[in-house]
């Protein structure tokens, strides 16, 4: 689906829109989520929490978004968290070099390539400035994407907005490990905002300055990377891998990936499988997924093995998750910087744990879910738009509508709405406009069902239950409605099985 249609739907239905949009000079890269968008975003995060955090018995924390300067001196971000940029000599516009060259050639350019390599390509291609059409460029330089904050009355206490949520996890590992009384492997998770001073924010939620992340850091003994009992559950599950050698997507079983050393061990294959399964449950077709192995020039400075999890969209392949083997880089770096011993002792051995990271973008996942769920179809002369969202993340389970507002139908339908809400169902009530337009409104935000209270409801004690995708309608007894909705929402019953 073209991104313009996503933006149109997002604006029309209050999913997301630019920050401070009533001011013409507001900076780009910041987005607001409306009431419906915020619900959908929460549902995605809660589904991640349920499927990847709680089921795996991980521990979830909530850390500060602002951290002191020494943290990022130790982590390496102040030195290494850079993008290559170039400035137009005429209009002084800045561009990220690797992205500019990719747009011109269609080829991939590693962001960690040397300045000399970029200068050579820039000179050869001689690109045109998009704003002033000039071909005159200054020297390429590295731009650090950290956002600084001045603290205190004098502003002399330097701090930074975190560029990734994981640093809180590393800083708190020792305390959490001791408090949890768990042995390794130990997963610690966090969801929240991170901040990156992007040069050219673009494609709405795909490249932002404030971005949502849901990260999991799994701490383990590197000597036991293949001693992982849960591996047996997924050993025959196939991962869509695109290795550096093959450059093509190939389904590979987790067992084969571990045995042939395509990945570093069984633990890593297991967590790659969990990621792929999670996005299958979000409704993404398997054929649109891949894990792309990154070479040294593309990997983050702290990673010794990286598999980017990507989804195919109308904008091409979009990275949603960085799966990084960070080894012992972070704990050793913060041990040195803080002068605190962050090693642990298990089975009579003292060591610094290694880390496998699952760093997922919340807003990017939100966008890709919309892109995949967006459906447009002809019904006679009319065109219908709906979001084919799984029930698990739909903003509401059902809409409740009176057929008309007279003859007591409005009051009785409101009473039904309140009774269903008491049972914990997330519902939306709408009485305005024709019933057809009300159906269309909830279809566009992905609500799976509509419940219509009409004159037969008063006479026969039934309501009409309408299904979003098929548009089929079935009568359900009001006394059975709560149980029916519960079964539908938990996958115990399908709409087709309703009699």
Image: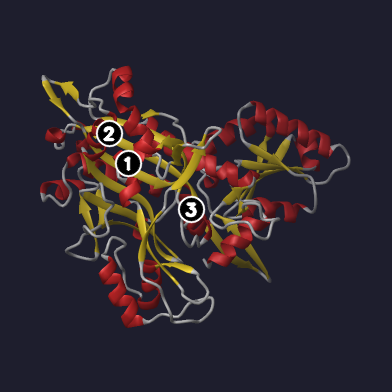
Dot 3: what SS?
Answer: helix
Dot 1: what SS?
Answer: helix
Residue at the (39%, 48%) spot, across then down? 279
Q: Which mark is residue 94?
A: none
Q: Position of residue 287 (x, y in %)?
A: 35, 60
| 332 sits left or right of 51 in the view | left
Of 48 and 422, which appears nearest the observer? 48
For the residues labelled 3 and 1, the Cα–Cα distance comes to 36 Å
Relative vertical location of residue 202 with respect to residue 350 in this rendering, above or below: below
Count of all numbered marks drawn on residues in the image: 3
For the residues carrying marks 3 and 1, which lies nearer the camera in this image?
A: 1
Relative vertical location of residue 378 with respect to residue 442 in this rendering, above or below: below
Instruction: Check the image and tell me how it is coloured.
Output: secondary structure
Q: Residues within 10 Å of mark 3 (few under 14, many from 20)?
A: many
- For disc 1, the marked residue is 73
Residue 496 in view of the camera: yes
Q: Earlier along the polypeptide chain: callout 2 or callout 3?
A: 2
- For disc 2, the marked residue is 337
Dot 2: what SS?
Answer: helix
Q: Earlier along the polypeptide chain: callout 3 or callout 1?
A: 1
Q: Residues within 10 Å of mark 2 (few under 14, many from 20)?
A: some
Of 416 and 85, which appears nearest the observer? 85
- For disc 3, the marked residue is 369
For the residues labelled 2 and 1, the Cα–Cα distance comes to 8 Å
Of 226 and 466, which appears nearest the observer? 226
């Amino acid at each position: 689906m073209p991104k313009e249609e996503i933006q149109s739907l997002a604006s029309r239905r209050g999913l997301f829109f630019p920050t401070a949009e009533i001011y013409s000079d507001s900076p780009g890269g910041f987005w607001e989520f409306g009431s419906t968008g915020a619900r959908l975003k929460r549902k995605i995060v809660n589904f991640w929490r349920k499927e990847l955090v709680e089921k795996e018995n991980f521990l979830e924390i909530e850390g500060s978004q602002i951290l002191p300067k020494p943290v990022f001196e130790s982590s390496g971000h102040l030195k290494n968290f850079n993008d290559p940029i170039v400035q137009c000599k005429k209009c002084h516009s800045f561009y990220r070099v690797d992205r500019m060259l990719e747009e011109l050639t269609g080829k991939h350019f590693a962001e960690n390539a040397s300045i000399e390599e970029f200068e050579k390509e820039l000179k050869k291609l001689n690109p045109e400035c998009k704003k002033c059409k000039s071909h005159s460029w200054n020297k390429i330089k590295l731009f650090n994407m950290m956002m600084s904050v001045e603290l205190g009355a004098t502003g002399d206490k330097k701090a930074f907005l975190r560029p990734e949520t994981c640093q809180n996890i590393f800083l708190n590992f020792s305390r959490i490990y001791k408090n949890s009384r768990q042995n390794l492997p130990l997963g610690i998770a966090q969801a929240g905002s991170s901040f990156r001073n992007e040069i050219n924010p673009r494609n709405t939620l795909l490249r932002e300055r404030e971005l949502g992340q849901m990260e999991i850091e799994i701490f383990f003994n590197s000597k036991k990377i293949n001693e992982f009992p849960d591996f047996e559950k997924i050993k025959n599950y196939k991962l869509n891998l695109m290795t550096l050698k093959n450059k093509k997507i190939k389904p590979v079983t987790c067992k084969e990936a571990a045995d042939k050393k395509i990945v570093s061990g069984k633990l890593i294959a297991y967590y790659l499988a969990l990621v792929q399964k999670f996005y299958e449950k979000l409704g993404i077709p398997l054929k649109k997924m891949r894990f792309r192995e990154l070479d040294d020039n593309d990997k983050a400075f702290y990673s010794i093995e990286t598999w980017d999890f990507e989804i195919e969209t109308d904008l091409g392949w979009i990275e949603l998750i960085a799966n990084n083997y960070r080894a012992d880089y972070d704990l050793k770096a913060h041990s040195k910087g803080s002068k605190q011993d962050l090693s642990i002792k298990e089975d009579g051995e003292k060591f610094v744990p290694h880390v496998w990271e699952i760093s997922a973008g919340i807003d990017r996942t939100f966008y890709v879910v919309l892109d995949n769920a967006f459906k447009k179809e002809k019904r006679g002369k009319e065109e219908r738009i709906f979001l084919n969202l799984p029930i698990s993340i739909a903003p509401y389970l059902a809409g409740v509508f009176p057929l008309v507002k007279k003859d007591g139908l409005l009051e009785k339908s409101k009473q039904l709405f309140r009774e269903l809400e008491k049972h914990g169902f997330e519902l939306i009530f709408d009485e305005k406009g024709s019933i057809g337009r009300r159906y269309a409104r909830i279809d566009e935000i992905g609500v799976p069902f509509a419940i219509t209270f009409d004159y037969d409801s008063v006479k026969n004690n039934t309501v009409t239950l309408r299904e979003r995708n098929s548009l089929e309608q079935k009568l359900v007894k009001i006394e059975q409605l709560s149980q029916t909705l519960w079964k539908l929402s938990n996958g115990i019953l399908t709409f087709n099985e309703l009699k």
